[in-house]
Each structure stands twice: as C-alpha cells, then as structure tokens.
Image (tube, rainbow, N blue to C red):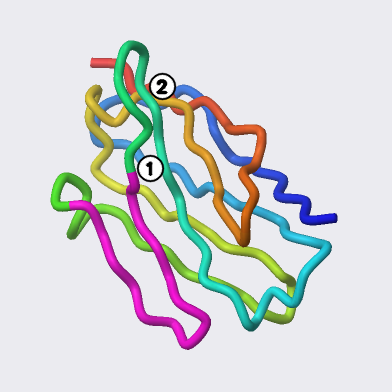
Amino acid sequence: QVQLVESGGGLVQTGGSLRLSCAASGFIFRLNAMGWHRQAPGKQRELVASITSSGITNYAASVKGRFTISRDNTKSTVYLQMNSLKPEDTAVYYCSGPGSWGQGTQVTVSS
C-alpha cells in the first residue's frame, strides 16, 4: 500500500531554514505528482507546493520565493526546502501522494 513518511520538522527561529523530506513507497514514484500541504491550528489544510512527475512546480503565493519543492526519483523522495521562515509558517506539514497522506511533521517558527 502507499506509504508516505515525513521527516525534518522542528523548531526554528524567524528567518531560519528547514528541509522536510518525504520517503514514499508502495507505488511508482516517478510517475506521480507529489505535494506538500500544511495545517495550522484552527485553520484548514492548504496546499503549499506541488511537483508533477516531469518536475513542474507550483507554489502557494505565501511561500513563493522562500520555499522550494524538489524530488529525487532514485530515492522515491520529495523534499521541501523552507528558507526565510516566518511565525505564520508554523503548522503541521503533510506530504501527499496518490490517494494518500503522510502522518505529518510539526514545524514551529519562533518570533
């Protein structure tokens, strides 16, 4: 079955950086689009970034220019490099794949 396992979350100060990883299994990774979403307390889950099987990327306006999504098909892993982090980026970040979500990883940005 599809499995998505995130890692790399943590506590960082404003302006800092983190890189999230999502290791995928159970499907043909290179043929599928992948995404990163986030959910802050009291808010709906929102799309942060996505990447198609051919590497075309899309970003939410709030993170464009600060976050970069990438994929390594040899490792079946998708990454989210987050720079210039802000307190409003604090959320649980989820990896998404074909019909499945990861368990989430907490990102907390202190002011």
Q: Provide the secondary structure element on which disc 1 rests.
A: loop
| Residue drawn at x 65%, y 41% as measured from the top left | 102
- Whether tag 1 and tag 2 are in contact, CB under 8 A, the answer is no
Q: In the image, what residue occupies the spot 59% across and 33% down?
A: 104
Residue 18 colored magenta?
no
| Badge 2: residue crowd in 10 Å (few <14, some 14–19, many ≥20) | many
Q: Which mark is residue 66?
A: none
* Three-letter residue code for mark 1: Ser
Q: Position of residue 17 (x, y in %)?
A: 38, 42
Q: Is residue 13 above or below residue 85?
A: above
Toward the viewer: 16 or 29?
29
Image point 34% across, 47% down: which residue?
47
Seen in the picture, residue 111 relative to 70 is either above or below; the reply is: above
Q: As drawn, which residue projects farthest toward the front?
A: 99
* Image quadrant where one finds the C terminus: top left
The label on residue 108 is 2
Q: Secondary structure at mark 2?
A: strand
- Split into 4 quadrants, where in the image is the N terminus? bottom right
Is 64 rendered above or below residue 94?
below
Q: Nearer the viewer, mark 1 or mark 2?
A: 2
Residue in the foreground of this view, choosing between 86 and 99: 99
Task: Bin the neighbour count of mark 1 within 10 Å (Cα to Cα): few under 14, some 14-19, many 20 and up.
Answer: some
At label 2, which amino acid type do we have? Answer: Thr
Query: For the residues marked 1 and 2, what is the alpha-carbon distance in whole angstroms?
Result: 11 Å
Q: Is 29 situated left or right of 50 in this image?
A: right
Span of residues in magenta: 47-60
Q: Position of residue 73 (x, y in %)?
A: 66, 79
Number of the label disc, if any, that sits on residue 17: 1
Q: Earlier along the polypeptide chain: callout 1 or callout 2?
A: 1
Residue 82 locus on image (x, y percent): 36, 48
Is 83 situated left or right of 79 in this image? left
